[in-house]
Amino acid sequence: MRLRAALRPAGGRPRRGTAALALACLLRALAGCGDEQSASVVTLDLQESIRNLAADDLDVSSAAEERLAAIGAPALPALHAALRREPEAVRLGIVQVLGEIRDDGAVAVLAAALGDPAEQVRADAAAALGQRSGAEAERAVIGAFGDGSELVRQRAALACVAACRSPAALDAVLRLALDDPAPEAGWAAVRSLVVLRGFDDP
């Protein structure tokens, strides 16, 4: 998977670690090479980093996570594509990275991960959406209330504390609290509802 990322030499600093800083410095150096018209375009191959998210060596997997999170929004197309083809261990790492990319585009990719065949990937995606707010995150979390997995519904209910604000969302949490047959999911909805109702107090 190859990604073309437009970079400005005076771009912002990377947000994480020395590896991220080294990456940013390298990209700036590359952007200064060649003719003026093409110097600002750098081609990155992210496939190795994405696959290294599942490496047994913690140093390797952590470095891959750090690099992808530092690249941020330009990495989202590659991460989204990898969610459709990589094994579960890699997909779990992708969801972790998506949770660290503070860009609105990451919400859409996390929402797509809620349709993953693996329960743990869906559960982790729901939890990551609990760090976001806005209508898109709210829709995704409420949609996960209908998941067949108790774990996913539990994570989605807890995620609603941050992601849910509309009256319709509050009603959905209430229905989950009253109707879900699984105790862990139901109690998670109750806990979230207590917090959410607090936002309505004068």
Image (spheres, grey):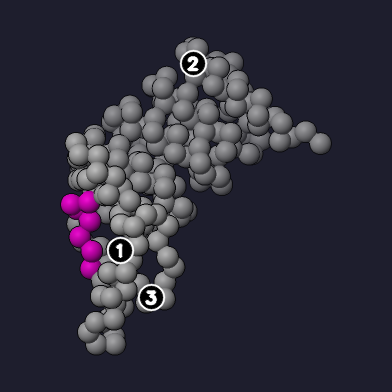
Q: Which mark is residue 147?
A: none
Q: Quadrant of residue 195?
A: top right
- Residue 167 belongs to magenta span: no
**How many numbered callouts?**
3
Helix, strand, or loop for circle 3? loop
From this view, report whether residue 80 is shown above or below residue 193.
below
Whether residues under marks 3 and 2 lie with C-beta atoms below 8 angstroms apart, the answer is: no
Helix, strand, or loop for circle 2? helix
Location of residue 13 in the rendering, given as x and y in whole percent from the top left corner: 42, 65
* Label 3, label 1: how far apart the Cα atoms are: 16 Å
Q: Amino acid at mark 1?
A: Ala
Sooner in the amino-acid sequence: mark 3 or mark 1: 3
Q: Circle 1 sits on which residue? A: 22
From this view, report whether residue 122 is shown above or below residue 101.
above
Sooner in the amino-acid sequence: mark 1 or mark 2: 1
- Residue 45 belongs to magenta span: yes
Q: Amino acid at mark 3?
A: Arg
Location of residue 138 in the rendering, given as x and y in whole percent from the top left corner: 54, 40
Instruction: Pick whichever, 17 or 124, lies toward us.
Output: 17
* Label 3, label 2: how far apart the Cα atoms are: 48 Å
Q: Is residue 41 visible?
A: no
Location of residue 147 in the rendering, given as x and y in whole percent from the top left corner: 41, 26
Q: Tell me the crowding category of disc 2: few under 14, some 14 to 19, or many 20 or more residues within 10 angstroms, Cα based.
A: some
From this view, report whether residue 164 is shown above or below residue 46.
above
Q: Circle 2 sits on which residue? A: 184
Write the residue at 25% across / 39% down.
58
Write the residue at 53% across / 29% down.
158
Q: Is residue 38 visible?
A: yes
Write the residue at 66% across / 25% down.
194
Q: Is residue 112 left or right of residue 161?
A: left
Q: Which residues are magenta?
A: 43-49
